[in-house]
Image (cartoon, grey):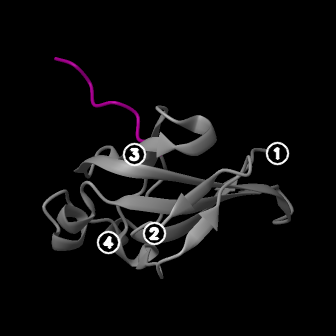
Amino acid sequence: MASDPAPYWNELAPEAFAEGDDPMARAMLGRTIIFRLNRIDAQDALVDFEIQAGRVIRVNRAEGLVLEQIGQKAGEITHLPLVPDAYALVSPGVYTLSGNFHIEDPDFQAAFDIYMPN
């Protein structure tokens, strides 16, 4: 019997996570998300950040939102937590990603903190 794969993140508040059949999760399938990843050190200071974007290609609880990246990291796969409250609709316009790549009219936005080990 195969074991479950390791999670992509720690579910510190499991009740915040949705299942793949959640209406918000289903609405995000095929949509473009612009997201900011903040790297935080052990003293809770911001080390750096990256702004990326991707199109949602798959949604489920185990993998979260699976995105195919757009821009500097085009074609790479990224996993974001399936936490509906973390995502918001974004106003139409042109947005600048890390690497000075521009994206027009993404659908959703989000930001996540990544805590670096000591």
Residue that carries the numbered disc 1 in the rendered image: 118
Looking at the image, tell me whether mark 2 or mark 3 is earlier in sequence order. 3
Front label number (1 vs 2): 2
Residue that carries the numbered disc 4 in the rendered image: 15
Q: Quadrant of the N terminus?
A: top left
Q: Residue at x 47, y 78 (%)?
A: 92
Evaluate if marks 3 and 1 touch, with contact meaning CB atoms under 8 Å apart.
no
Of all residues shown, which one is farthest toward the left? 21
Q: Position of residue 33 (x, y in %)?
A: 44, 61
Q: Is residue 18 left or right of residue 101?
A: left
Residue that carries the numbered disc 2 in the rendered image: 105
Q: Identify whether 19 is placed above or below 71.
A: below
Evaluate if marks 1 and 4 touch, with contact meaning CB atoms under 8 Å apart.
no
Q: Quadrant of the C terminus?
A: top right
Task: Calculate the distance from the C-alpha at mark 2 to the C-alpha at mark 3.
Answer: 17 Å
**Residue 7 colored magenta?**
yes
Task: Calculate the distance from the C-alpha at mark 4 to the C-alpha at mark 2.
Answer: 31 Å
